[in-house]
Amino acid sequence: MRARYNLWRQLLTWTRTAAPQGPVCHYGYDWLTQNQNLIKQLHTDNLLNCFAPRAYSYDGQALTSWDSDLDQSVARDRAMAPSHPIYPFVNPTSFQSESYMPGNPVNSISTAVRARAEPACFPTGRPTYVRGPS
């Protein structure tokens, strides 16, 4: 793990040098991500200072299942680095077919994100943000 950590430390140090005020987030399947200890260490050392959990939906996935995935991501991230903001990357269309989830997904997803995280990014061709809790 030490070699991987050193590589990430170097890459993130270069990133911080290039954009010192910018957020540097961990993006991924936060409830499934491997290398949890490495990610936690990078947050502990403030080389990463936010999370960007991948919160897309899958074909046939119900909103309750998506909601559960978001809860798992937020819980894992808050346990790892409670003071670091969480910016979910969400999309109300399915990852595979690009069809919309059943029901009113945009409203439901926006409500869920606002209740649990900071602003979120909805990839819609242009950046769209949903404000999180104050």
Image: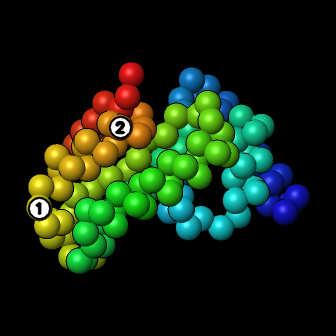
| x 79%, y 60%: residue | 4
Left or right: 43, with 113 as reference point: right
Q: Nearer the viewer, residue 105 or 21?
A: 105
Residue 68 placed where, x, y %? 40, 60
Residue under label 1: 103
Q: Is residue 103 visible?
A: yes
Left or right: 35, with 73 as reference point: right
- 4 is higher (above) or lower (below) than 86: below
What kind of residue is marked 2? Ala
User: Of helix, strand and loop, which one carries label 1?
Assistant: loop
Give the numbered dot on residue 115. Answer: 2
| x 11%, y 61%: residue | 103
Left or right: 9, with 124 as reference point: right
Q: Quadrant of residue 99?
A: bottom left
Crowding around mark 2 (Cα neighbors within 10 Å: few <14, some 14 to 19, many 20+) is few
What kind of residue is marked 1? Gly
Left or right: 34, with 94 as reference point: right
- For the C terminus, give its image quadrant: top left
User: Of helix, strand and loop, which one carries label 2?
Assistant: helix
Residue 29 placed where, x, y %? 50, 62
Cα distance between the residues tagged 1 and 2: 19 Å
Crowding around mark 1 (Cα neighbors within 10 Å: few <14, some 14 to 19, many 20+) is few
Q: Is residue 48 visible?
A: no
Q: Are marks 1 and 2 in contact (CB under 8 Å)?
A: no
| x 25%, y 42%: residue | 111
Q: Nearer the viewer, residue 24 or 32?
A: 32
Residue 21 placed where, x, y %? 57, 23
